[in-house]
Amino acid sequence: MNGNNRSNIKKGMPVAIVLKKDQITGKLTEGVVWDILTKSATHPHGIKVRLTTGEVGRVKEILDS
């Protein structure tokens, strides 16, 4: 599943996000969703989330739990 649809993402899911500082390189950071920050149903660059570690970025992949 991709991270462009808000309905695919739930609190507690493992995801891979791209942090703002890593947008140029595309480096992914894995973690668990704490908050969903994007209010709209979809976003072309990925739904913005906050991980349990406090890092904020856009979801690029939803990982298998």
Image (cartoon, rainbow, N blue to C red):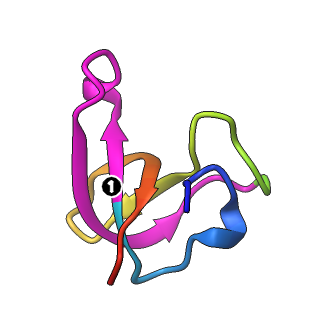
Residue labelled with disc 1: 16
Percent across and percent down for residue 60 are: 44, 47
Specify few, some or many for label 1: CA neighbours under 10 Å numbering under 14, 14-19, or 20 or more.
many
Viewer-closest of 30 and 52: 30
50 versus 46 height, above or below: below
Q: In the structure shown, which secondary structural element does the residue marked by tag 1 occupy?
A: strand
Check the image and name the residue furthest to the top: 24
Percent across and percent down for residue 21 are: 26, 25
| Disc 1 residue type (three-letter) | Ala
- The answer to which image quadrant residue 1 occupies is bottom right
The magenta stretch is 16-39
Viewer-closest of 3 and 58: 3
- Name the residue rendered at 69%, 57% in the picture: 5
Percent across and percent down for residue 14 are: 33, 73
Viewer-closest of 28 and 1: 1
Magenta stretch encompasses residue 19: yes
- Name the residue rendered at 70%, 42% in the picture: 43
Relative horizontal placement of residue 16, taking residue 44 as reference (left or right)? left
Relative horizontal placement of residue 60, taking residue 55 as reference (left or right)? right
